[in-house]
Image (tube, helix red, strand yellow):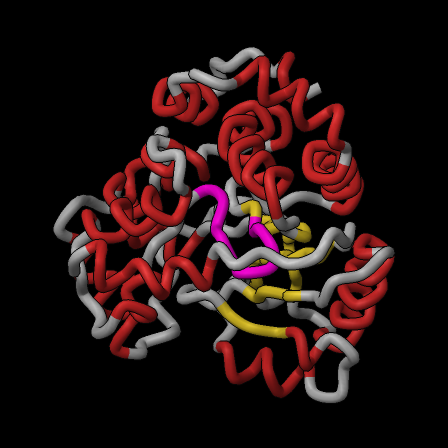
Amino acid sequence: MEARELHPVVADLFARGRRTVRVAIEQEYVVAAADGSVVPIEELRRAAEGSPAAPHLSFEPGGQLELSLPPSHDPLGDLRSLTADLRRRLGGITLRAVPVDPRPDVPLQLTSARYVAMQRHFDRIGPAGRRMMRRTASTQICLDWWPGRAGIEQWRVLNLAGPFLAARFNRSDRLATWLAVDPARTAFDDSLLRDEDPVASYAAFAAAATVFVDGPVGHLSTLFPPVRPRGTYLEVRFLDALEPDAVERAVAVLEQLMYDDVRRRDVLRALEGSRLAELWRAAAVGALDQEMAA
């Protein structure tokens, strides 16, 4: 798929919104029955019926449960209360904020054409794709994306600070799995920052990735950069699934980077020109100095 075909769709992803300061959290959980076995997704849906969390539930290919909450000025309070209610309703089914499911054999539960094609593609590269799809969980934090110069700074600072934040908050080999999945569609390098026009950089990144679903929109949905453009907000995707106290600390750091003009520009000055590929590899093996993430 050529960059010029992708460009107008990518431009919509970079539209940006208003100068608001909201936060939304998307929390993934590894799910297990009382005996430790895998829980079918339909059983989870039935158990969650009537919960205030039910409208915000979705699932990952291995049956990981995702609680995707709307923007809020108290995202941690919302996450804690809805998760607690959901756990009460699930009874003996456990939700664990762990980044990697310890069970080695987790089946593919979502078998739509998209996921089957994705798995087939990743299998050509190695085992990391199956592990990522079926056994990993993350905490994704979404932040308002501003217009003008500030919005360009926000995009750059999240990408540049990403390895340091991962080094500070992550506690597993989940990131190493992501780095091995398919480098052409995960962008753990400087490919998204090479052009002064971020739309052009992202379209070029998307054009270089193997196409295995139809249409520009579908193809873009199969890309997994550490920071994903979402039109009016940015989605931070590089964090392990975190416990609530760690989520709170991560949100505080990200709010400063995104919404404090002075802090954002100070960090940008310190990190511009970084060799991101090397930094991501160091973060994945626990060898990166965390000073810049303080």
Query: Is residue 235 positioned above or below 118 on the image?
Result: above
Q: Is residue 285 left or right of residue 56?
A: left
Q: Using the image as rendered, state which of residue 164 and residue 98 is in the foreground.
A: 164
Residue 149, image x and y in percent?
60, 38
Query: Relative to 131, is 143 on the left or the right?
Result: right
Name the one closer to the observer, 278 or 260: 260
Q: Quadrant of residue 10?
A: bottom left
**Residue at (22, 63) in percent of width and height:** 5
- Quadrant of the image containing the N terminus: bottom left
Q: Is residue 155 visible?
A: yes
Mainly helix, strand or loop, the magenta region?
A: strand
| Residue 52, horizontal then vertical, whole percent | 78, 79
* Above or below, 16 relative to 91: above
Q: Quadrant of the C terminus?
A: top right
> Is 113 left, or right, of 165 in this rendering?
left
For the image, the number of numbered tags is 0
Q: Most extreme residue toward the left, as rendered?
A: 124
Give the magenta range: 226-235
Name which residue lies at 24% across and 61% down.
119
Residue 113 percent location from the top left of the image: 25, 77
Residue 122 visible in image: no
Magenta span includes 240: no
Residue 177 in picture, x, y percent from top left: 36, 39
